[in-house]
Image (cartoon, rainbow, N blue to C red):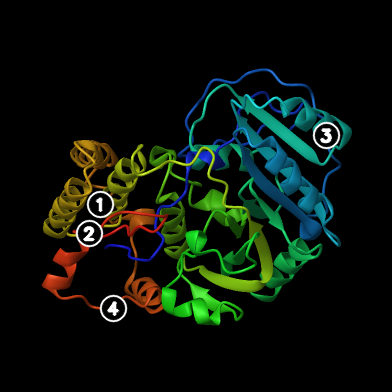
Amino acid sequence: MTADSSNRGRRGTGDAGTGGEEMAGSPAPQRPVHERRVPERPGPERRVPEQCVPEQCVDVVLLSLNRVEDTLAAIDSVLRQQRVAVRICILDQGSRDPRLAELNRRAAQDGRIRIKYLSANVGAAAGRNMAAALGDAPYLVCIDNDAELRDPDALARICDHFERNPGVGALSFRILNKASGRDDLTTWDHPRALLAQADTSFAAARFSACGYAMRRALHEQVGGYDADFFFGVEEIDLAYRMLATGATILYVPDVVVLHKSSPEMRVTWKGRRYYYIVRNSLYFQFKFGTPLPRLALSALAWMVKGGFNGLGIAPVRAVLDALRMSLRHGFRRRGRGPYHLSPPVRAYIEACEMRAKEDFVTKVRKQFVKLGGHSVSTSN
């Protein structure tokens, strides 16, 4: 089982927050099965907001790592939401931004904001699990901290979509580049052919963490994000485990996120980005039962592409680490339980992904291209 799209695994560590001490009086959340314990650092106490009426309450998850000015703008876009009771669950992962004190003051003045502080960056996957655990609303909304909700009724529309579509487990938002007003290609996780239909709703097999919503009960049922990913591929892994339960994903263009595409704190190709994408893609494929010969060919292709792009031993290290992660995951769990995709689920994914058949020569040529931008595929 492989995944293929124009924008797989683009998430960066810039979307992770700073961890710390939970709000005083917060209920003790259950730890997701994939969450790892991390060092915390004390933070000021936060007022506990009143309990939300279930059908009206939404928890918005934000990860913060510096970029406090962007985080404050994201908060403002959430607090102006109408017709819903909202709580903002923020995880800060060791920010050193001088404006962090302003974020603290904002939280101290508004009981709808909960902040947890960590002393180190634990990654986007573990970070979102920890932030989600700060709330208890039936709907979870996740946006990047360099993104904003465009419309004041965005959260109300999300609630309406879930109430009208009981079989839908997650919503994928329309994400626009804030500067250009056009669809943000760095976060478009759907087939490129559907860009022309970006203003219409359609069934999807995945979402971007820059803007999506999920039923909390489903998030907890599948165990949240797999923290081992750290960065990259974590969203599709969560999406496929969610689809395995029989739920579906709906792309909703009437919920719009404006993305600033901040370059700060992003993982680059010359950094560790290629390493994470290779490692996580192979691990993801192993978990969902990709035949081992096909997995070996994929590993070889990743190494060839990395060598062509002058990335040194990073691809080799990634393959070896993917092997270690897969062995730790275990063959008994491979393609079973939450990683088992039934024939109807596979058919749904194939219909949504619109994958085109490629001949051998085309696949070989794909390995000899220069890497650039944010686009990358999780399969070769």
Task: Choose top left, top right, bottom left or bottom right for residue 56.
Answer: bottom right
Quarter that holds the C terminus: bottom left
Who's the residue at 63% across and 73% down the image? Answer: 253
Mark 3 against mark 1, which lies toward the viewer? 3
Instruction: Examine the rendered structure and indicate whether residue 9 appears above or below residue 83.
Output: above
Query: In this rendering, would 130 be left or right of 106?
Result: left
Image coordinates of residue 285 in percent, x first then y, are 28, 55
Badge 4: few (under 14), some or many (20 or more) residues near its Cα, within 10 Å? few
Could you tell me how far apart the alpha carbons at marks 2 and 4 are, in whole angstroms? Answer: 18 Å
| Residue located beneath label 2 in the image | 290
Q: Earlier in the sequence, mark 2 or mark 4?
A: 2
Task: Choose top left, top right, bottom left or bottom right for residue 8.
Answer: bottom left
Instruction: Examine the rendered structure and indicate whether residue 331 appears above or below residue 348.
Output: above
Q: Earlier in the sequence, mark 3 or mark 1?
A: 3
Label 1 is placed on what type of residue?
A: Phe
Q: Earlier in the sequence, mark 2 or mark 3?
A: 3
Badge 2: few (under 14), some or many (20 or more) residues near its Cα, within 10 Å? some
- The answer to whether marks 2 and 3 mark residues whose Cβ atoms lie closer than 8 Å is no
Image coordinates of residue 337 in percent, x first then y, are 36, 55
Query: In this rendering, would 238 be left or right of 129?
Result: left
Mark 2 against mark 4, which lies toward the viewer? 4
In terms of depth relative to the viewer, which is nearer, 267 or 120?
267
Q: Which mark is residue 356?
A: 4
- The answer to whether marks 2 and 4 mark residues whose Cβ atoms lie closer than 8 Å is no
Label 4 is placed on what type of residue?
A: Ala
- The answer to whether marks 4 and 1 mark residues whose Cβ atoms lie closer than 8 Å is no
Who's the residue at 75% across and 46% down the image? Answer: 73
Q: Dot 3 lies on which element?
A: helix
| Residue located beneath label 1 in the image | 286
Q: Dot 2 lies on which element?
A: loop
| Residue located beneath label 3 in the image | 106
Label 3 is placed on what type of residue?
A: Arg
